[in-house]
Image (spheres, rainbow, N blue to C red):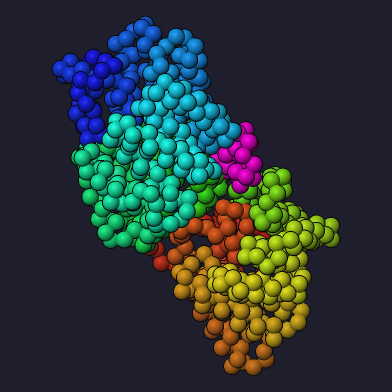
């Protein structure tokens, strides 16, 4: 293969298969004179990072010690970052090459492209949360200086390419700045349009402007419309036409049948041209649409295809997106074995710096979902250290919050307490009162459980500390009045503290808190939380009935039944079995409170029926689409309750010989492992 600054054979996005063939068979490439820089950009744009790496390595080998190899070594470093995920090593290499080219008498073209490559690497580091967000400003500064330099030299083509890279740093970043991107893109469109130069460059600028205008205003109209994009794409080939369909679908709130057909057609065009980035995005759009429509098996198949495309192309970030989608689809389909396999693959990928920063917290949630608290603890610890290192307190706080949840899952309440204290500190430092309320509620839970597991009761000093945390949360919410966020935070706090009041034998206070929480949830239209309130109210009333008599039991049964009616329709066995358990206990208590033999027998029969339902639901326990509050540190409904509690009731009611039916492999809660939780709310 020959490398030339002049392009003898024009390259386009549709030419990727031929380009890859020549890269992989260098002896055939002697027939054509190639512009290696342009070839690399085409391959990277197409998501063929492995092909770009092979090409850059080939050019470096060809050039030997020639100083022209510096820029191609920079391409190698960038490709390796995207493939292997070692951001810090790649940035170090690029920084050195950048200094050498900028101050070593290299050409204007080399200075332009090394600025772009370094900025891209910085952007990858920031976007994937492995580099401090402040570094993005340095990347923009580098690009801005180069953009202004090239405009001064009247090099419209290169200036516009740098400007487009700069615009992307405003659009694709942790905190998008669409207004700045909008102004810059309008200037680029004007420059390229007036010069009559690259049709591809004008198409790319207008396609990004189309997205930015809709992001900025939320409106369906803008200076660039659908027909104009299609008109620009027509002479550019099949890949450009496919990119239009993807852009239109990306900006649609819902994917209509016509839009879906457009994406499917685009997918075919991308596959024909080995355009991996477009193929990947098309698959992701179709997979997410299927998942939203609850076609989880279809979504899973599409996500798995996207995983393979990302592997073939060599972009680690895309692989993370696709793996998480596949995991969620497998989970929602109840495919426990596959969900566990994907969770293990996600865990293994977290050894890579880029993957940990971009997806670490998602992986923690996935591991918590399958019940692997030990593995989730390790990843959460790494995430907390990473986010603290790069100075992102919001994510550091979330990581420590999820770390606390993992410790709580393992029954290590002292460690959970320590983690949740750090999480609360992060929220207080960044002045996030709503989130801080969740943190205080979790911390109160840990403080209570440390005392409860050690002493079997809550000391007065513990109760005072718990009450103080609740008062601080209530005071912090006062300035926000009756806003939706404040009401939701207040109600969640009441839920957690009501559970702690039940443990502390303060059932009257628990019922009062739950009544307030229920009113708020009804007001906000949160039916699930209303049902949880009813269930917790039933527990509080059962506790009160121990001292106040059978009337409380009747009220408890009514509340538990309301909760059961909701969750049975929702098909939520994790909660349904617990409600049946408490209804069994309530029926036994009711039978013991009556002297009438006939009524006693009726209550006993009700207890037997409820217990059988609880046993059946335990047998159905499976991986659900998300563990409510498990990844945030809040407690699920009666979180300490485990299937072991059914055994004594089986003996009392004569059901100890009955066994649950065996079904397909599901993710189940082991009674033995559940003992780690200790007693809670019963």
Any part of residue 322 in sight: yes
533 displayed left or right of 575 = right
Magenta segment, prevailing SS (helix, strand or loop)? helix
Quick one: which residue is furthest to the right in this view?
460
Q: Name the residue: 63% across, 57% down.
A: 634
Across and down, in percent, residue 163 comes to: 43, 32
Quick one: which residue is furthest to the top in this view?
65
Quadrant where the image shows the N terminus: top left
Across and down, in percent, residue 273 comes to: 22, 37
What span is colored magenta in the figure? 377-400
Give the quadrant of residue 241: top left
Asked whether 27 or 162 is in front, the reply is 162
394 displayed left or right of 85 = right
Asked whether 452 or 483 is in front, the reply is 483
Asked whether 421 or 156 is in front, the reply is 156
Any part of residue 116 in sight: no
Q: Name the residue: 39% across, 55% down.
A: 221
Asked whether 324 or 71 is in front, the reply is 71
Give the quadrant of residue 397: top right
Q: Name the residue: 60% across, 43% down.
A: 395
Q: Is residue 510 above or below residue 295?
A: below
Across and down, in percent, residue 173 comes to: 50, 40
Residue 211 on the magenta span? no
Across and down, in percent, residue 591 comes to: 63, 85
Q: Name the residue: 23% across, 50% down.
A: 265
Residue 390 on the magenta span? yes
């Amino acid at each position: 293969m020959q490398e030339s600054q002049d392009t003898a054979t024009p390259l386009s996005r549709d030419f990727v298969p031929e380009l890859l063939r020549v890269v992989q068979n260098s002896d055939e490439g002697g027939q054509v004179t190639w512009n290696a820089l342009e070839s690399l950009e085409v391959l990277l744009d197409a998501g063929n990072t492995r092909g770009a790496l092979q090409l850059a390595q080939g050019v470096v080998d060809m050039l030997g010690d020639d100083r022209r190899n510096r820029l191609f070594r920079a391409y190698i470093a960038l490709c390796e970052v995207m493939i292997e995920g070692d951001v810090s090593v790649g940035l170090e290499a690029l920084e050195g090459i950048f200094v050498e080219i900028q101050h070593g008498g290299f050409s204007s073209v080399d200075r332009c492209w090394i600025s772009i490559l370094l900025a891209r690497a910085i952007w990858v580091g920031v976007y994937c949360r492995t580099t401090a967000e402040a570094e993005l400003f340095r990347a923009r500064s580098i690009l801005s200086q180069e953009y202004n330099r090239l405009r001064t030299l009247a090099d419209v083509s290169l200036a516009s390419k740098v400007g487009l890279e700069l615009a992307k740093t405003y659009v694709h970043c942790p905190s998008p700045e669409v207004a700045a991107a909008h102004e810059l893109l309008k200037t680029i469109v004007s420059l390229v349009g007036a010069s009559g130069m690259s049709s591809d460059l004008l198409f790319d600028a207008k396609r990004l402007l189309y997205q930015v205008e809709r992001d900025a205003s939320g409106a369906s109209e803008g200076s660039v419309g659908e027909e104009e994009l299609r008109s620009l794409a027509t002479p550019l080939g099949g890949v450009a036409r496919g990119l239009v369909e993807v852009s239109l679908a990306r900006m649609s709130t819902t994917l209509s049948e016509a839009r879906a057909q457009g994406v499917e057609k685009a997918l075919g065009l991308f596959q024909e041209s080995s355009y991996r980035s477009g193929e990947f995005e098309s698959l992701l759009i179709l997979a997410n649409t299927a998942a939203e429509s609850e076609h989880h098996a279809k979504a899973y198949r599409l996500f798995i295809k996207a995983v393979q495309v990302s592997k073939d192309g060599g972009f680690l970030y895309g692989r993370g997106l696709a793996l998480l989608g596949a995991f969620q689809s497998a989970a929602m389909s109840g495919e426990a074995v596959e969900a566990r396999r994907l969770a293990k693959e996600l865990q293994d990928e977290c050894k890579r710096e880029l993957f940990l920063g971009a997806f670490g917290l998602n992986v923690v949630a996935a591991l918590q979902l399958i019940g692997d608290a030990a593995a989730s603890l390790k990843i959460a610890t790494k995430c907390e250290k990473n986010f603290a290192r790069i100075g992102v307190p919001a994510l550091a706080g979330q990581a420590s919050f999820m770390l606390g949840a993992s410790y709580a899952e393992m029954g290590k309440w002292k460690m959970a307490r320590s983690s949740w204290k750090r999480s609360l500190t992060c929220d207080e430092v960044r002045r996030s009162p709503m989130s801080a309320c969740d943190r205080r509620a979790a911390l109160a839970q840990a403080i209570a459980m440390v005392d409860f597991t050690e002493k079997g009761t809550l000391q007065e000093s513990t109760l005072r500390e718990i009450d103080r945390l609740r008062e601080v949360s209530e005071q912090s919410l006062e300035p926000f009045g009756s806003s939706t966020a404040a009401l939701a935070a207040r109600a969640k706090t009441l839920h957690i503290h009501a559970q702690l009041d039940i443990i502390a034998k303060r059932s009257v206070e628990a019922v009062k808190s739950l009544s307030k929480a229920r009113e708020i949830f009804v007001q906000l239209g949160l039916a699930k939380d209303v049902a949880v309130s009813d269930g917790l109210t039933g527990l509080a009333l059962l506790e009160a009935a121990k001292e106040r008599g059978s009337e409380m039991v009747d009220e408890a049964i009514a509340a538990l039944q309301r909760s059961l009616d909701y969750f049975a329709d929702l098909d939520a066995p994790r909660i349904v079995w617990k409600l049946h358990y408490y209804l069994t206990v309530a029926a036994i208590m009711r039978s013991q409170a009556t002297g009438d033999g006939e009524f006693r027998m009726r209550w006993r029969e009700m207890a037997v029926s409820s217990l059988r339902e609880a046993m059946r639901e335990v047998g159905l326990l499976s991986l659900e689409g998300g563990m409510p509050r498990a990844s945030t540190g809040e407690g699920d409904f009666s979180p300490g309750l485990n299937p072991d509690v059914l055994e004594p009731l089986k003996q009392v009611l004569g059901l100890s010989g009955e066994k649950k039916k065996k079904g397909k492999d599901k993710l189940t809660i082991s009674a033995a492992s559940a003992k780690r939780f200790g007693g809670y709310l019963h």
